Image (cartoon, grey):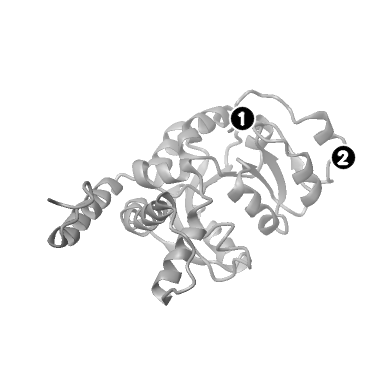
């Protein structure tokens, strides 16, 4: 959880700060959860990376990656600010960094939905701050063997910097960039992520055991479950409840489940029809 009090990093984190590279732009990573931590080694070759997350002790992480921890005002003053906080914290985070941001700064978010986050950032940040929305279509599990060729959605927000971001993602990180609008993204993700996470969560709730005799199809289901089972409840809520198009998809899923099962005496709300 991100605290917005202007407190500096712990004294232990300030003892040995890596010397900034004047040849590299600076980037602040606000929100160092599982995905934020996953980003660090992929970014530090191109940026002077600074971390901000007062809800977590960053000392070991900073030492391991040779990066620096800063407070929220310090993070806001970097050339690029990468917001990796849950959507529920996005508005308060944007409001907290807004007074400290420099004109011409670039803010990039990585929320798994795009319409609402881009609207929030546009409302809360000064018009001199450029905004680009991204959604990496991978995470620590799917990207554990490298991110080359993995897909990332890019949505223009405010300003003209999305082309610069796109070039960096393509040429430096070697990602497959999908340019889209926030609405198109959210409409597709309501199915792509909504159904994937919903089915996987159902399998976890059912406590489906491991079997010796499986089909290739069932193995794919197990792999899907394993890839998302460590994702947070916060992320699941964002995908299911905060995507403006998810309610229709979930409703359609429930109705279709009933329609498929009813001829055989089952329904989604009763084990066996009388």
In the orientation shown, which residue stands out farthest toward the front?
Answer: 274
Mark 2, secondary structure of its residue? loop
Q: Residue at x 80, y 35 (%)?
A: 13
In this rendering, is residue 92 above or below 16?
above
Mark 1 and mark 2 residues within 8 Å of each other at the beta carbon = no
Quadrant containing the N terminus in the rendered view? top right
Position of residue 239 in the picture relative to residue 2 (left or right) = left
Q: Position of residue 218 (x, y in %)?
A: 41, 70
In this rendering, is residue 227 above or below 149?
above
Which residue in the structure is indicated by mark 1? 100
Position of residue 267 in the picture relative to residue 18 (left or right) = left
Which residue in the structure is indicated by mark 2? 16
In this rendering, is residue 139 above or below 3?
below
Q: Nearer the viewer, mark 1 or mark 2?
A: 2
The quarter of the displayed image where residue 28 is located: top right
Q: Earlier in the sequence, mark 1 or mark 2?
A: 2
């Amino acid at each position: 959880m991100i605290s917005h009090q202007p407190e500096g990093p712990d004294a232990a984190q300030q003892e040995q700060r890596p010397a900034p590279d004047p040849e590299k732009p600076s980037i602040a990573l606000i929100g160092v959860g599982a995905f934020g931590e996953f980003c660090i080694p992929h970014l530090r070759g191109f940026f002077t990376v600074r971390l901000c997350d007062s809800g977590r002790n960053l000392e070991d992480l900073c030492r391991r990656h040779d990066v620096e921890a800063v407070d929220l005002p310090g993070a806001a003053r970097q050339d690029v600010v990468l917001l990796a906080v849950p959507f529920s914290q996005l508005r308060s985070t944007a409001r907290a960094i807004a007074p400290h941001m420099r004109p011409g700064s670039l803010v990039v978010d990585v929320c798994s939905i795009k319409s609402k986050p881009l609207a929030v950032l546009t409302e809360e940040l000064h018009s001199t701050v450029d905004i680009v929305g991204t959604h990496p279509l991978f995470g620590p599990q799917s990207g554990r063997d490298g991110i080359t060729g993995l897909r990332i959605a890019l949505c223009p927000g405010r300003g003209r910097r999305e082309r610069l971001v796109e070039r960096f993602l393509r040429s430096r990180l070697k990602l497959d960039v999908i340019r889209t609008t926030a609405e198109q993204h959210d409409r597709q993700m309501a199915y792509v992520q909504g159904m994937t996470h919903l089915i996987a969560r159902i399998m976890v709730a059912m406590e489906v055991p491991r079997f010796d005799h499986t089909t290739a199809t069932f193995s794919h289901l197990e792999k899907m479950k394993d890839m998302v089972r460590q994702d947070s409840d916060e992320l699941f809520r964002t995908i299911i409840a905060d995507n403006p198009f998810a309610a229709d998809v979930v409703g359609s899923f429930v109705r279709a489940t009933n329609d498929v099962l009813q001829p055989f005496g089952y329904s989604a709300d009763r084990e066996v029809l009388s």
